[in-house]
Image: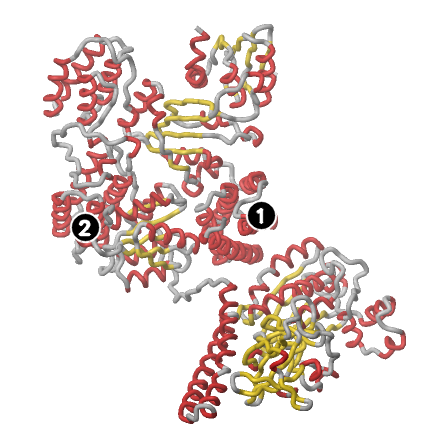
Amino acid sequence: MPFSFAKNTATAETLCTVEDALPLLEYLQSHRGAKVDLGPCRHLHTAVLQVLLAARPKITVLPQDPVLSGLLSQALGASGEKETK
Amino acid sequence: MSTPLLERFVSEARDLLQAAATGLLILERQPGDEAAVNEVFRSVHTLKGSVGLFDFPAFTKLVHAGEDVLSLVRARQLVLTSELVDRLLDTFDQVSAWVDAIDTTGTLPKDADGASREMTAGLRAVLPADFGASQATASAVRTGELVGLDWLAALPEKDRLAAFAQAMDGAEIQAIEYAPLQDCFFSGEDPLALVRQLADLQSLAIEPTEPWPVIDHLDPYRCVLCFRALAAMPRVEVETLFRYVVEQVRVASVPPELLISLTGDPNGGPVYGDFVDEAYPLIAAGDWPPLRRAVGALLQLTAPTLLLASALRWLDAILAVPVPNSDWVNALIACIADGESNFRPVKAAQPAALANSGSRHLPDPTAVPEAPGRTDPGKVSSTAVRILESQRAILGLLTAGGDIAARLGSVAQTVTNLLAAEGHRADDLAAWSRAVDAAIAQDNAAPVIEVLDRWLAANHPSAASVRPEAGEHLIQEIKQTSRVLKVDQAKIDTLMNLIGELVVSKNSLPFLAKRAEEVHGSREMSREIKDLHAVIDRLAQEMHGAIMAVRMLPVSEVFDRFPRLVRDVARKLGKQIELSIEGADTAADKNIIEALGDPLLHIVRNAIDHGIELPDERDASGKSTQATVLLRAFQERDQVVIEVVDDGRGINPEKIKASALAKGVIDEERAARLTDQEAVNLVFTPGFSTAAQVSDLSGRGVGMDVVVNGVEKVGGSVSIISVMGQGTTVRLSLPLSMAVTRVMVVEAGGGMLFGIPMDHIAETVRVHRDAVHRFKQSEAFVLRDAIVPIIRLDRLLGVEPSAWFGDGSDEDAVLVVRVGGGLVGLLVDHFREGMDIILKPFDGILADIQGYSGSALLGDGRVLLVLNLRELL
Amino acid sequence: MNKPLARGHDSDMRGRRPRVLVVDDGITMRMFYRSVLEAAGFLVEEAANGMEGYEKVLTQAFDLMIVDINMPKLDGYALMQLIRGEPAVRGVPAVMISTEAGDRDAAKAYEAGANFYLVKPIPPDELTEVARLVAGVTVP
């Protein structure tokens, strides 16, 4: 299970696959206001990205991978940034 | 719903698929056959080109995969195994099915995407893993052209600045828009992963294609994202990366100036009037260092969120090269002067300047720019620039030692045409013309290259990138070509009908001649009409012959499907069979060829299924394990003969007899008297089948009687010769051309149908019963001053007079026929339609019956008796 | 040496329909070219292979040739080489058509004698524009 779900934070692991989209979505649906820690993540599947874009949870830690981090901050940037600040 | 182009495509696709399949089978047996490889490859290649005209992505993808495989086979990098042949044949079958679907519905079936994906993956699995990369040119597929580039301005400025810097370094910048299919997750695609593979990704915007739903209603497995990216890499690399999703991707090459757009707060900040005033003369003088320093200094003083700062950052980027583009600089200075965010580069930044109509000048980089004009950047057409770049590249090849005379002509003409098409001023044309003359005089391309370079430098920073490479083509075998015209069958049939009517019309001329002599007393006129009749008659006959010749097709039309069939069936049954074909170019009428298909199929299946033994059995009887089936066609007098010869076990007459007895086809007494040949002929008896069980391959519950019926329908005959242990020969004899007779069908004797040859018919009339005169037993009526005797057809033929007394209108249907120079009215119950029939003379005990020329089988299976009026009347 | 500027000025083009020769073995492709180019005002002549194309170029005057690369009998490259070696017709501009988008193939086409290179599938607008520019047809 590449996401470990805690009370109010979901933490990603190295690779998030298409299988992880639904559990993440269900978690975010049932835990409004939960945060997501993408620190360890090196790639996340488009389906997971889509859940993040639609649900706009607070991203506490961006991935360490610089490319992915850049992509995500731009994609989530527009409205996500205000929330994370 | 179908267009002429689509119809053309359907017919071409069928031909190409047949050619590909045929070639493939030859190739399987003779892997070295160069001509066959080329034929198969070219067929598939041409098909790919044609299907690209339509929106059938599933079709295109699959054919493309097939082409990739075949290109490796052609290059001898891939061995054509039986499994691969199977796979390719399956592919062709699938594509054929789609062609049929397109033919009937105009579109691909719903499941085409899935089938295509699966089969494409199957084909690609045989390709080497690095195929896409190493064969980038061979496999490169063209992505769509991206139009709207408005979104570029919305990308972060720092990304655009970075890309701009790359472009100034000579990189090609591509704008990529990728909208994955909504169900792409289900086929294992990860669009983000694909986008991340873009080598030099400068910027990426990911946006939903529709508003996000409430989080509770989000479907996580439906992809609704659209990716927009800027990448500094050649287009071909982008296309290679996205080669499996090409139709979801649009790419455009981005001229650097399109990256420039200003953002930030337009209000506030100092007014840089002095800077603007100083800048213009510096630009005009090409004195860049002071300008660079000034821009650098102002950047330090300006708050970065201001629009002014944005303009300065762009100025800084443009000025970073040794010789900056003065138009861009001017435009930015204008922005600073006006406090305007609208970047309006003057002409040099605009390849569209070339595409606009009206008389204009090609930009001259040394000239001081005119007042800022404006063309819409969305309408940038780079075609003219691309063409000029190509000419430049070709001239580059010349300097490498080509034959200038051979190439300069077309280049000069192309550039001249382009200038003319663009409506340029005469002095551009004159400059070009002078350069061309100079080049010819010096036998050196330098003067024209110089002019082109000047124009191009002003238009586009990217240099033409064509590497000269040694040509490696040999002029292929040159042969006289035969030109083939494809004609719709229906048109030929129309011609047949018309010639039939012409014959009938022509037949009224002798009657006219007679009238001219008898009624109008002009022998001379009569003779002239007769002469004319002779001429028209000859022409009509020749025309008939010519039209019949058009209908002639080679038997290969039918034979071509057998290599595949024999191969498949043999593999299924575990038999080893070599099929040879002789005389495939023997021709016969289209109807004969078409009627031949099913009977032949049946005979060949019978031979493989029942005739040919398994390899072990053959080995045991001292035969080669590889059996032979020979399909042979040849012409024998006015017949075309088709033989199916196998070297199998032959037919056992005793087994046939026993089987016939068991089935009650014959009785014991008859069985005892039968010769072997007669016994063999029993297989033609309706419902007869020797196979212990009906296999799914042959028979399907029908016997050789089906063959006989099919062949006899077109006036042919079937015979069979079999030698126990050595094989069987089935021989079909068919008329070369259909003895097509045009008849009019009439009904008489209460629903019986008779055919009357059209040649005899003068006209059809309806005669009021009161107008029929009776003279003793005879009846007659008056037709335009002539007395025409009436004969009741039912009485004439001795069939029961019908209970038919007219249709209430008190009129009788009378067919006026011309026999032996006189007119006769045949009274019938009804006129029916005219039709072309295949007349089959009576044989056997019916052969001597008078009054009939023969019979014909109607489409609904009824027999039509055709009257011989000369004998009857 | 024939003078390459024999015609092509806009004054020459007025009142005469430009003639284009399409050389392609695909019957559907030929129909496509014909319909698009006729709509753009061209008179279209077809050839089904390189040999036929060569004969037509030698016997008729064209303002433009559109030449497929992969063809039976005589392929596009060989056809272009023949034409460019023939002084009477070597000035006719030619656009080669391929399904391969690589630089290498474009270079081969230019080497053989093409003046421009287009990659299938060709959008009708692009075909029209290129044909118009290369054949020197002004927009009415």
User: Which residue is under mark 2?
Assistant: C10
- Determine whether the residue tagged by mark 2 lies in a helix, strand or loop: helix
Q: CA distance from mark 1 to mark 2?
A: 51 Å
Q: Where is residue B742 drawn, in percent x and y? A: 57, 75
| Residue sticking out furthest to the right | B668
Disc assigned to residue B94: 1
Q: Is residue B808 left or right of residue C4?
A: right
Chain letter for the residue marked with disc 1 in the picture? B
Q: Is residue B526 left or right of residue B322?
A: right
Q: Is residue B683 left or right of residue B421?
A: right
Q: Is residue C57 or residue B550 the one in the foreground?
A: B550
Amino acid marked by disc 1: Gln
Disc assigned to residue C26: none
- Determine whether the residue tagged by mark 1 lies in a helix, strand or loop: helix
Could you tell me if residue A20 is visible in this image? Answer: yes
Chain letter for the residue marked with disc 2 in the picture? C
Above or below for B242 versus C68: above
Above or below for B8 versus B623: above
